[in-house]
Amino acid sequence: MTVIYEDNHIIAVNKTCNEIVQGDKTGDEPLSETLKKWLKEKYNKPGNVFVGVTHRLDRPTSGIVLFAKTSKALTRLNEMFRTGEVKKTYWALVKNKKIAPEAELTHWLVRNEKQNKSYAYDQEKPASKKAILHYQVLAQSDNYSLLEVDLKTGRHHQIRCQLAKIGAPIKGDLKYGFDRSNPDGGISLHARRVRFIHPVSKEEVVIEAPVPEDNLWRSLVQGL
């Protein structure tokens, strides 16, 4: 576990693709529990340690996860995520099809709970939700493009689904059409940056998470 930001109210972790934010059916220890142990040991705290989950990242995705260290911060951050006051920027490695260098994508997403998958449509469908994102190409190699993605809405598997819809599936994402898995079992989608007004101090906070230790990531982010 790698802590990349901490103050009295908030702590941020750079999640790997194998870590989970909250407990699930696998029974693996979630980051929220690992963080409680870390804080207890670091500050030699007696009794229970408070760690509040403010948002989630899919297990195969890496990058920033924000946690609250106080109940006041948790309540305010939850509301800020709900209203879109926390601006999230992602980086993604995608199959290098000749996509536009920059675009805003609008689709209607239908979630299939049984498959744990979303489907994107160009027109509104029954039970669909509007999904909007903006991307730009930051760098390219012979086979891949590095995209910076800003979410305008927060839908289930939104980035994975929308990029696959335009023929640019994320590297390693078998569920959305990439042809082979990554060696670590994750996908090349990284929560790169969050920007928000601190819920207590009211100052702007910008947190960035280093990209995974991977030769392709390193080669594409060089010079950015």
Image: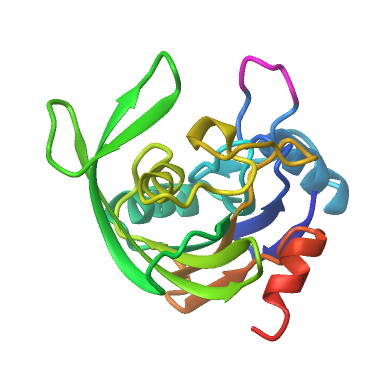
* x and y percentages locating residue 79 in the rendered image: 33, 50
Instruction: Residue 121: name its quadrant.
Output: top left
Question: Quick check: can you spot residue 52?
Answer: yes
Principal secondary structure, stretch drawn in magenta:
loop
* x and y percentages locating residue 112 in the rendered image: 35, 21
Question: Quick check: can you spot residue 197?
Answer: no
In the foreground, 78 or 176: 176
Question: Going by the picture, which residue comes out furthest to the bottom?
Answer: 223
In the foreground, 62 or 184: 184
* x and y percentages locating residue 53 in the rendered image: 54, 41
Rendered view: 38 above or below 219: above
The question of residue 207 being in magenta is answered with no
Horizontal side, residue 164 vs residue 12: left or right: left
Q: Which residues are magenta?
A: 24-28
Instruction: Residue 158: name its quadrant.
Output: top left
Instruction: Residue 57: name its quadrant.
Output: top right
In the foreground, 223 or 165: 165
- Identify the image quadrant of the C terminus: bottom right
**Who's the residue at 47% across and 52% down the image?**
168
Horizontal side, residue 158 vs residue 108: left or right: right
**Who's the residue at 73% across and 41% down the image?**
182
* x and y percentages locating residue 99 in the rendered image: 41, 64
